[in-house]
Amino acid sequence: MLDLGGFVLNNFVFSAPTQIIFGKDTESNIGITTHEYLGDRVLLHYGQSSVVKSGLKDRIKNYLVQAGVSVVELGGVVPNPRLNLVQEGIKLCRDCGIQGVLALGGGSVIDSAKAIAMGVQHSGDVWDFFSGKAFPKSALSLGVVLTLPGSGSEAGGGVVITDSENQLKRLAWSEHVIPRFAIMNPELTFSLPQYQTACGGVDILSHVLERYFTNVTHVDLTDRLCEATMNSVIHNLPIALEQPHNYAARAELMWAGSLAHNGLLDTGRVGDWACHAIEHELSGLYDVAHGAGLAVLLPAWMTYVLEHDLRRFVQFAERVWQVPADKGNPKGVALEGISRMVAFFRRLGLPGSLTELGIKDSSFSEVARRCTHNGQTTVGNFVQLDSKDIVSILEIAK
């Protein structure tokens, strides 16, 4: 076990610039809010069908037009949003003199909108930001009407885009694409399919867990904030699945998604992010749902790195999964915590193995190669993982 005594609460700067407009009917003010923050000519960006079939897209457009905002539409965003649609959106914005981008949807739509906002004022290829060749110096202003909680993208600067032609899924980050505002009405999530709700809930938990497992000590306040957020999700997610129109449960999940990823839980800590790095490569190759991939990877990663800081895993088991304390068998307590988490994911109807996701073990070495840039780097901060470690974790998850 690593001696963690030398790592204490780090210096930090915290800012949460997104204005959160939360509650029933809040989308009815989208016209005035958009005009104030984004300008009078915007791109309305959305997904494939649900917001169209429900009438929400037309309702939002009407609010915008009534406020004097000119609207150009671009739909068609899919899960694991695609580079080619981003490039189409950039051209559209340039051709139409767009001043801001309004994302209507969940994390995939928001990330696609962010990438478009990044690319409009960039002279090169927007993929430069995802390959590390360039960093955004500016972007169009961005707003959000959230319909799927989980990603937390409505309150952060992270952007994940997939180059489907090359089977690459990559992350970029910029303060310039942190949304100016996010309208969050839990009622807009009532019609979500159960699988999407479940995957979104796991995504929230994963964002907390990536921050929770840290080598920094004396972070009791943010430990407790992390644990409270996870406990709230664990309590409310099954309720939302059983009672889709339960406003209270939907509201708790929606707010938890933002708090999990707006930087507050990061303060003074160094997160891990290995599971996200591995899952991005799996999604790039197999196009699996992000939350489903994480539901499989998280327990496997925990099992593999358990001994690195057994005390933290015991704390996780006792405080989050209510495993009774047993000082004579700390490893048993920790393993029971992981077991209860797996059982919870199963209860949500999510897969329990890579095989169930259609992922073959013949691809494990390729996933590890991609994660580590041909073995030149490692992933993760809690425990730094090389190619062999990643393959071992994938074998556990198989």
Image: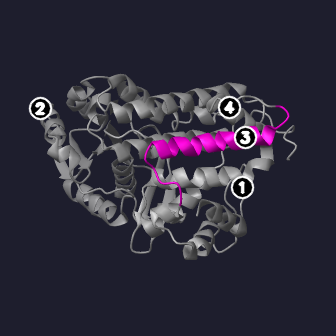
Label 4 SS: loop
Residue stretch rendered in magenta on the structure? 327-353
At label 1, the amino acid type is Tyr
Residue 329 is tagged as none
> Which residue does the image show at 35% across and 26% down from the upper left?
21
Query: Is the residue 80 above or below the residue 368 in the image?
Result: above
At label 2, the amino acid type is Gln
Q: Which residue is mark 3?
A: 334
* Whether residue 26 can be seen here: yes
Badge 1 vs badge 4, beta-carbon distance below 8 Å: no
Label 2 SS: helix
Q: Nearer the viewer, mark 2 or mark 4?
A: 4
Q: Residue 221 at what x, y percent from top left?
A: 68, 24
At label 4, the amino acid type is Val
How many other residues sit within 10 Å of disc 4, few (<14), some (14-19) or many (≥20)? some
Look at the image and say whether residue 343 sits in the magenta stretch: yes
Task: Determine the residue located farthest toward the bottom in the rendered image.
Answer: 362
Query: Is the residue 277 above or below the residue 331 in the image?
Result: below
Distance of mark 1 from mark 4, alpha carbons?
20 Å
Instruction: Determine the image quadrant of residue 183.
Output: top left
Distance of mark 3 from mark 2, alpha carbons?
56 Å
Distance of mark 3 from mark 1, alpha carbons?
12 Å
Q: Which residue is mark 4?
A: 323
Distance of mark 2 from mark 4, alpha carbons?
55 Å
Residue 304 is tagged as 1
Distance of mark 2 from mark 1, alpha carbons?
56 Å
Q: Is residue 176 left or right of residue 48?
A: right
Q: Which residue is mark 2?
A: 66
* Whether residue 181 can be seen here: no
Q: Residue 78 at what x, y percent from top left?
A: 31, 57
> Which residue does the image show at 36% across and 54% down from the upper left?
112
> Which residue does the image show at 24% across and 33% down from the upper left?
35
